[in-house]
Image (spheres, helix red, strand yellow):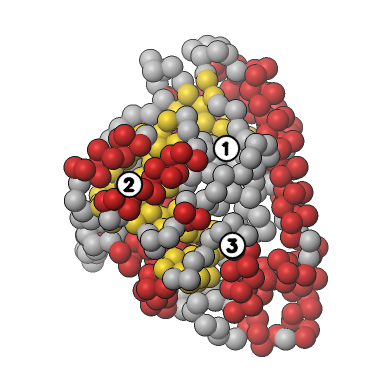
Amino acid sequence: MEYKFADRICGLKPSAIREIFKYAADPEVVSLSAGNPAPDAFPAEALEKISARLMKENPTLALQYSITEGYAPLRDALGTYMAKYNIGKEFDSLIVTSGAQQVMDLTTKALVNYGDEIICEAPSFIGSLNTFRSYGAKLLGVPMEEDGMDMEALEETLKTHDKVRFIYTIPTFQNPSGITMSLEKRRRLYELAKEYGVLILEDNPYGELRYKGEDLPTIKSFDTDGIVIYAGSFSKIISPGMRVGWCVAPEEIIQKLTVCKQGSDVHTNIWSQVLCHEFMTKYDFEGHLQYLRDLYSKKAEFTMGLLREHLSDTITYGDIDGGLFIWCTLPEDVDMPQFCLDAVKNKVCVVPGTAFLTDESATSHNFRINFSTPTNEQLEKGIRILGELSKKL
């Protein structure tokens, strides 16, 4: 039988870089390519106790259908938590989602028609880019500078394109670059979006993972005009496997996201929602966040020390104040995909920068390292191998 797929799926192509990850299945390969939390970051003991108590005292709550908008006590707790960061105005509402990734999916489903345009940072998170592509959106990449998106390029893009539905940004410890957008640029981004009548989709999965420096206000905290959709997640601060995220946006938008979600999964896993609520409200949630910051701060410092020790000057990288990633740059005359292929053949896997491009035909001289998942021994082995390869360039 000849299968006929939807036009929006026919346009999606498997990435050539996936060939590299086939090598990563080798148990001897050190994977610096994941984006997972550290195994010892999970509050497993607390979650076990909460789950056991839930199944003993109120199993129906965990096992029955629930409402699409989310478990009401969790929504209340998240509303209180967001208010600490000045997120949530009188016109806003909140929906619990199946991870922050679902916020990207529901937002695109609700707002974007085939051929509409979405402005993204270049580079940006591959999961979101693929979601946008799956709805037939045209991606408009805006280059990144050391302090975030190039605002002059953003303004020029807004001036010259009239089908932009929203601007997608990860302003804090961006994936993959690790860059944090400056306060000045956050305000400028908001003003440009307001001026050109465009929404902002602010993705903030790493905001709580700052190790040093001062916290910056979210773009959503500036939102007095109802133009910012905010995505939060428990994936990096409690558990990614539980698949619990949330969205704060104007009520009218949340209503549409709710209808879209009913056609996707009815509601987010209620068991996971209850666990997140109990952990937030009955355990030392702030203490847990500080534990994560201390954990990742040590791993980041350890990794940066290894990079300084082993990598040659041919590879440059930025220091980081938070998040889980380090963005490395090769000289322009070096074949980056070949370097990544050579690395994995030598038993270390990194993510080629081409995975994060808005323009799939463009080239990249970058690769991404993750330091949260590997052990210190694996980090030392993997970066030593990268160093040996870098000295041959």
Front-lying residue, 237 or 81:
81
Q: Tell me the crowding category of disc 3: few under 14, some 14 to 19, or many 20 or more residues within 10 angstroms, Cα based.
A: some
The residue at the point 59 percent across, 49 percent down is 207
| Front: mark 3 or 2 | 2
Left or right, 2 with respect to 377, comes to left
- Amino acid type, callout 2: Leu
Residue 87: % across, % down = 53, 61
Q: Secondary structure at mark 1?
A: strand
Sort mark 1 into few (<14), some (14-19) or many (20+) by Cα contacts within 10 Å.
many
The percent coordinates of residue 346 (x first, y second) are 57, 26
**According to the image, label 2 marks what residue?**
192
Asked whether residue 17 appears in the rendered view, the answer is no
Residue at (33% x, 46% y) in the render: 192
Residue 342 against residue 356 in the figure, above or below: above
Earlier sequence position, callout 3 versus callout 1: 3
Residue 200 vertical placement versus 177 (above, below): below
Q: Are marks 3 and 2 in contact (CB under 8 Å)?
A: no
Classify mark 2: helix, strand or loop: helix
Q: Is residue 147 left or right of residue 312?
A: left
Label 2 or label 1, whichever comes before in sequence order: 2
CA–CA distance in space, label 3 to label 1? 25 Å
Task: Specify the label residue 82 is tagged with.
Answer: 3
Q: Residues within 10 Å of mark 2 (few under 14, many from 20)?
A: some
At x 71% / y 66%, what residue is drawn? 280
Q: Amino acid at mark 1?
A: Phe
Q: Which residue is mark 1?
A: 325
Disc number for residue 154: none
At 74% across and 60% down in the image, what residue appears?
A: 285
In three-dimensional space, the C-alpha distance between marks 2 and 1, rounded to whole angstroms, equals: 29 Å
Element on which disc 3 rests: helix
Mark 3 vs mark 2: which is more N-terminal? 3
